[in-house]
Amino acid sequence: MEKKELLYEGKAKKVFATDDPELLIVSYKDDATAFNGKKKGTIAGKGVINNRMSNRLMDKLEQSGIPTHYVRELSDRETLVKKVQIVPLEVIVRNVSAGSFAKRYGVEEGVVFDRPTLEFSYKNDALDDPLICLPHIYALGLASEKEMDTIKAYSYGINRFLKDFWASCGVTLVDFKIEFGRLPDGKIVLADEISPDTCRLWDSATGKKLDKDRFRRDLGGVEEAYAEIMGRLEAADRG
Ligand code: TMP
């Protein structure tokens, strides 16, 4: 599949057109940002890890019945995906208190919930991705009620699957952010990526953070944490 013009460059990925109008090539960068781009840096090797991890996880999710944009891995950093129209929402599922949840409600990090939570942010950098409720999603015409029912069901399903998978790797899935897109026929599919950039992953035994919080919070050992979490996934896949 031939890479054609650059269509879009985001904070962590580039998106290219291909010969096929229904397919795109995503290229993962080592660039890292946090706090809506206010903090910038590089995590050496991150693009390779995020590409591979996201593809493995999407492949597993597809097999478990969740439709995704993933088509096939082309190289270390590049993946062929179905072209979708992104629903401009960040969908966040949480199993354990951390990050903005802990801050907003004044609770400590690490409180395990009886049931997962689900929330949405409006993807809009100029507005700093504000939290948004369902009636406001409908008022702004960002998605239909039917689409949101599908997104909710898929999101909880993805959480159940990923939580069990990471548990088998000795890792607690604290929370994660996903995005969905519409195929030309209107079908909703999981898009974007699932990686240590977009999940909180804590070692189940020690609580050690194995995700982008090491970068966001200047905890050190960022590259090592990305390598370790990828190693855990590969070890689980080897069985
Ligand atoms: P939060 O606690 O900061 O709201 O983050 C919740 C989850 O979403 C966490 O796993 C990190 C992920 N996330 C992103 O992937 N992109 C973002 O821009 C933000 C704010 C969070």
Image (tube, rainbow, N blue to C red):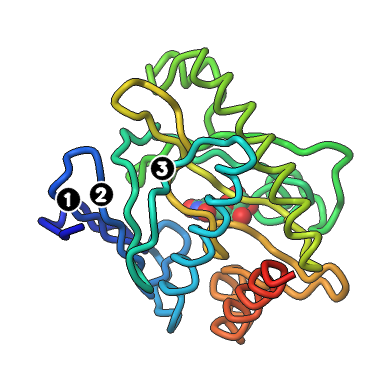
Q: Amino acid at mark 1?
A: Ala
Residue 68, given in percent of the width and then of the height, sits at: 47, 41
Q: Is residue 54 left or right of residue 83?
A: right
* Element carrying mark 3: loop
Q: Which residue matches tag 2?
A: 24
Q: Is mark 2 within 8 Å of ligand 1?
A: no
Depicted 184 relative to depicted 53: above or below: above
What is the quadrant of residue 78 in the picture?
bottom left
* Element carrying mark 1: strand
Instruction: Bin the neighbour count of mark 2 within 10 Å (Cα to Cα): few under 14, some 14-19, many 20 and up.
Output: many
Q: Which residue matches tag 1?
A: 17
Pointer 2 with pointer 1, Cβ within 8 A: yes
* Element carrying mark 2: strand
Closer to the chain start, of discs 3 and 1, is: 1
Residue positioned 55% across, 38% down in the render: 91
Q: In whole angstroms, how far apart are the C-alphas of marks 2 and 1?
A: 5 Å
Q: Which residue matches tag 3?
A: 69
